[in-house]
Amino acid sequence: MTDESSSSISYPPIKKYKKSLKLNNNTNNNNKNNNNHNNRDIVMQPNSTDEESSDNEKIGFSDPENEKINKHKASFKDSNDENNNNSTYYEDTDDDDYEDEDEDENHKIKDESDNSEDFNNHTKNTTDLDEGFKSTVNGSESEEEEEEEEYEEEEEEDEEGKFNLDQYDEFYEDDDDGDDDDDDDENAQDKVEILQIEHQNLDNDNDNDNDYANDNIYTKAKEALHLSAVPDKLPGREKEKATIASFIRAKLKANESGGCLYIAGMPGTGKTATVKEIIKELQAKKKQQGGGGGLNFQFIEINGMQLSDPHQLYHILYNKMQKTRKSLEPKKISSQDALRLIQRNFELKNKKKQFRVILVDEFDSLITKKQTVIYNLFEWPNKPNSKLIIIAIANTMNLPDTLLPRVKSRMGLQKVPFTPYNIEQLETIIKYRLQDLDAFDEESIQICSKRVAAVCGDARRALEICRKAATIANQEYQKKLLIFNNSNNNKSLSGSQKLPIPGPITADHIEEVFEQFSSPLLKKLNQLSFYEKLFLLCICRENQFSNVPEVKYGTISTRMRIITKKINVSCPNPTQLFQLAGNLLGCKFIIIQDDKPINWDHQIKLNLPLEDLSFGLEQDPDLKNLEISNN
Amino acid sequence: MQRLLDTINKKFSLQTDIDPAKPKNKKNENEEKNKVPGRDSQYRKLKTFIDKTAKSGKGDSLYICGPPGTGKSLTLTTLSKNLSTKKYKPIYINCMQFNQPIKIYIEIYRKLENLVSTKKGVNESLDLIESKYFYDFDNKEEEGMEKHSDKNENEKKTMWVKYREYEIDILIEKFSNILYRIFEWPTKDSSKLILFGIANDLGLVQKSLPRFAKIGMEIEVLHFKPYTEEEILKIFHHRIDLVFKEYKLKEEDQKEQLFEPETLEMISKQLSVNGCDIRKAFDVIRRLVTLKFEKYIENADSNDSLDEDPDEVIEFKSPGEYFFSMDLVQDVLAEFFECKIVSNMKSLPLQAQIILFSSFLPVLNYETLYKSYKSQCSIINFPLMEKADFGLSIDSIISNGLMKIESGKKIALLFSKEQLISAFKSSIIFDPLLEELNNL
């Protein structure tokens, strides 16, 4: 015993040096490790004699093994929590509108929570590595052998857990309360540990943010790519901008009549930003030329989504028209009277009357059953002395075809389509936003713009993907800073090492973001074990074969037996099959009608659409490699 | 030159306002001045109707129907301008400005009393209208009232009530009671009201007012048919004459050089195919003026000459050059009336274009379309999209007007197979998909 303790003490600096190397390897080789792990599961299981011998040897050492099992379960639960957070987070981002300020605050809070979770992972990895090093006797072994030993230990722990659970179930099948009590105790212990770890990480967060927040390129890139940061100019829409500007300028020069203009396009294609840019330029010209020149006009913007009732448009429009006359208080007039006063204003002849440009954004939300509001909007510019230009913005190109004939007649023929962005336009938009920052590779911007242009051409989506790539790169940089600080504390005497330089955001970060944007079902499927996937595959085959949504448990077990024979893989025990079904029931992949323990005659039903599940299983790498044929 | 463009813009805008304050000394000049081209027969019928009703000393009503853009309101406003203000008091009410149909009584009362605004309610206004103008037997020689009332609002409301709650007669009576009451006013003994109802629906009288047929009272219907090609051309020439009168061009040779020959005929033919709407015709002319204005502004900015002489004479370089050429007219017509489905297809994202090829199925919904999309991607060896991205691509197709989601999550196509083939016949990527389409 004394020799072992002395040998463990004599090697601490070498082990700490190897931690940093393995962290880098783990971050880069996560996918490879998963594949190796799955393959080893297949190889190890036919050796039944080895399992029995290992079980017999380790029965006597119960206390340290139980501790390892508890920590192992804790890691599983934490990983599940993180995945749930990630899935909900990305689902929310798809649905959110980023123009609201409150949602921006929520967005920032989520960023902070992500950082804290990453530090949780970091500390847990260090604890696992410590366990690994303590268990080994010889310190001079290579890294590869150490990795193999780690995986063997994990497998042994799994087997021990199953064995204990089986024994427990045999003795206490009827007592459900006992199970619940034990689970509560374990959960309480886990919560205490999680709170301690989070507390430590919060301190680390504060220190790192105070030191390095200002110098970081990634935070600047995130701010530039944020949706609320509106640039002065909008690249990629020069042609549409020229069309709209010539329309407005010509109408302003022609002193008497007005006009209507309809702008249509997908969300995120720069419709509103283009119109506002044109108005800014015209107002700048107005200031340069003074009173003359004929470019004097009043700009009024109305968003259809801000109105609870479409008839409120009259009230808001009248108040905004009156603001130029410097009335002290806006009068509280009903929408009926406001409409009459507006009509009177547009009918009067007055040479000094000012031109008005009204931008109606989200125009399709103003449509009612009778379409009175849009009828009046398009009736006013057609009057001889109106001096009114209306620009209507909506999403659908053929919206005028769905309107009433009398409204369509007054709407006019002038339309400006905003087509989805193509690859060059998205590249110029992203580069224009990142004007002087060198945070992104040339290749990463191209990959992002090509992927987004092929799907929907939405500029918001492209900016969001680049922003998330910057977030991922920032997290990696923070990990490097942690390692640097830890090593710097130990080597405080030298003090001459430099800070690690943040590298550019590469195409790998972009690909990682696209993987995170994929559907949560595929993520959940990838986390299942091999036999759980086989179980789901049997349910899919049985549903497709019999065209019945509910399948008996017995038929699935027979189909499971058939498939395992073809693959030359050992079929699990009946108790193991019950456990597989229980795990899938816990994950809500399947539904079983009764709460009683699973029986051969129970009806099993999928909780997912069948086509989604079959699509996910077809994409799964494990089942692809085995080349399972259709039964 | 700017004055000419302003004048053309002004004369080709819609003239629907009423100016009762204008003095009208001579009837012949007024009639000649306010002529409505293309609607001479309808104008004559309306005038004889008013003269007949005024001579009889009683009220009467007339229903005017026709599609939008056929000159219904313009004919009546021109007629009201030509009437003498001593005998008649014209009132114009547009029902699209009311939230509720019953508020028309407030508006009628306000217009009759020449009030800027009134705080009286619906029932009070109705009682005042009926007591003052229809039950006053002492003043038999009181002035007659002419009223133009657009009944589009009531039409939609009554139809809505009928379809939604067909068996409840009280509600039908409640909403169509307004129409009955307004059309009953001319039939009162002491009434001198002449009522013109304007709407788009030809059979509104038979649909919404069936009790009048039972009583035996018939409402006369005047139908404004869509403009023909010749009538549109006549309107164009009439407006151009107005331009030249105001602009005071002396030489008659310049009149011929404003539009190239056959350009106006071409515009008339195009509009006769696309709905015979005179508002669209005026939009085309104003678009031509806008394009000329852009060139004028560019020249003015380049020459740094902002001011212009009002008495400038337009110089036409050669007899063969025209102010509005045929090329310019063809560009504007192509911009407005060209079918844009093919260009919209080409501007779609690439994945959305593949979805268009996979959409010719007997039953179309998201699931069948996704299956067909997967088979199309396997033909080209193209990477698949996720389901969320698939929804985004379908949204881009819908916003370009090529698909439409109906009830029950079914998808309707708004394009044909030939249009898809003509859009992508020149691309190499989609050659296998085009062969698949030809085999279908």
Image: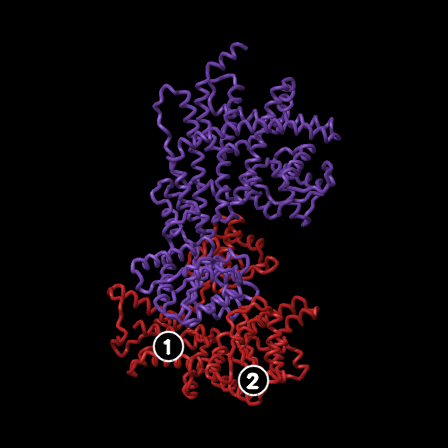
Q: Provide the chain ID for the residue under circle 2.
A: B
| Residue A299 shows up from this direction | yes
* Quadrant of residue B54 within the rendered picture: bottom right
Q: Which mark is residue B142?
A: 2
Q: Residue furthest right?
A: A174
Q: Quadrant of the N terminus of chain B?
A: bottom left
At a point 53% along the width and 74% down the height, the residue shown is B111
Residue B78 in the image: above or below residue A541: below
Please name the amino acid that badge 2 sits on: Glu
Chain with purple colouring? A
Q: Could you tell me how far apart the alpha carbons at marks 1 and 2 are, in whole angstroms?
A: 53 Å
**Circle 2 SS class:** loop
Residue B77 in the image: above or below residue A91: below
**Coordinates of residue B282 in the picture (x, y in percent):** 42, 73
> In this figure, which residue is indicated by the disc labeled 1?
B263
**Circle 1 SS class:** helix
Q: Which mark is residue A542?
A: none
Please name the amino acid that badge 1 sits on: Thr
Colour mapping used in the image? by chain
N-term-proximal mark, 1 vs 2: 2
Relative horizontal placement of residue A531, taking residue A374 as reference (left or right): right
| Residue B423 shows up from this direction | no
At a point 40% along the width and 76% down the height, the residue shown is B266
Give the crowd class for mark 2: few <14, some 14-19, many >=20 residues within 10 Å.
Answer: some
Q: Colour of chain B?
A: red
Q: Residue furthest top?
A: A2
